[in-house]
Image (cartoon, grey):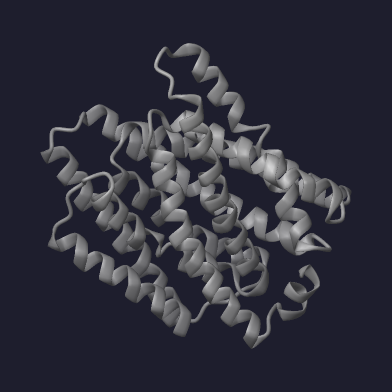
Amino acid sequence: MGDLIIQWSGTPAGEALALVLALFSAMAHAIFGAINKGGVDPYFNRGSINISYSLMAAPFALFVFPWPDFELFKILCVTYFVHMLYEWLQTVSFAKGAFTVVYPIARGTGPFITALCAVVIFGEHLKLLQWVGLGMLSGSIFLLAFVNYRIALSNNQNISGLREAVIAAFFTGIMIATYTTIDAYGIRLAADPFTFLCWFFMMGGFGFPLIAAHRWLKTSEHPPIPDLAMRGIFGAIVGVISFGAIMLASRLGKVAEAATLRETSIIFATGIGVLIFKERIKLPALILIGLIALGAILVKIG
């Protein structure tokens, strides 16, 4: 399977598959964010998810796919720390702010920075129409976050907590761009793309769960273990699908295009915010969602 991914890289068939994988990852990531946001505590949710996907990946990393060489292992170590910081920032934003506010800010910050990194590191070049589409997508996402921010304030949400959530979400977006670039480099360096993916997920079980365990000891309100375990297992499956799909898309096609298309997850996330978390959405937000979709289309057809 890994050989097929490598053979298709840069081909028309690979570009088409990258498009499908990026959009599939977008939908899965919105669901993943909702799983992390919901429940008793996002810290416990994320820790349970990471433990679950680490246990799932370990047999494949150790016994099925080739082990990483020294160069790839160095990249895996770097991305381990980057992802742990990203996960902590995202969890802070989820704990303090409304889903429809913090999620768009995080997802809107990443694509433009990722595109610039792709130009410098991978030698990718976007056409003018693609830059226009990228600007439209990122700008509309930020405006959507602003609209939802005003709605959250009108609902008397804690202002200081919401501001802290916004700051955490902004830096989450920077870390998204950082890990997307590093991971794209790592999966291209690997002799087998699935070596990178399996070791990434296995190592994740030794990161954020330590933060979650510390919080567990410091708080008195704990979710039932069976409920937390089920949330962790389901979240892990969705997380593996989301992250695995976007990494394979970045291996098959352009990193900047894959990263941009994945941010259509905000469309799915808005629907989840309204249906699951009962958050309000108004006409301006619906218009901006349409512009986000149009921006993504321009990036792909540009």
Q: In the rendered view, would you say 41 is above or below 9?
A: above
Task: In this rendered view, identify the residue nearer to me: 119 or 94.
Answer: 94
- Residue shown at 59%/77% (left/top)? 17
Tell me where residue 158 sits by quadrant: top left
- Residue shown at 37%/68% (left/top)? 135
Tell me where residue 184 sits by quadrant: bottom right
- Residue shown at 25%/28% (left/top)? 160
Where is residue 84 shown, x and y percent of the image?
59, 36
- Residue shown at 56%/21% (left/top)? 213
In the picture provided, is 248 more to the left or to the right than 177?
right
Where is residue 130 shown, x and y percent of the image?
45, 78
Where is residue 82 shown, x and y percent of the image?
61, 41
Where is residue 148 shown, x and y percent of the image?
22, 49
Q: Is residue 38 visible?
A: yes
Q: Is residue 302 visible?
A: no
Which residue sits furthest left?
154
Which residue sits furthest bottom?
12
Which residue sits furthest front?
226
In the picture provided, is 90 more to the left or to the right than 7?
left
Q: In the rendered view, would you say 78 is above or below 264?
A: above
Q: Quadrant of the N terminus?
A: bottom right
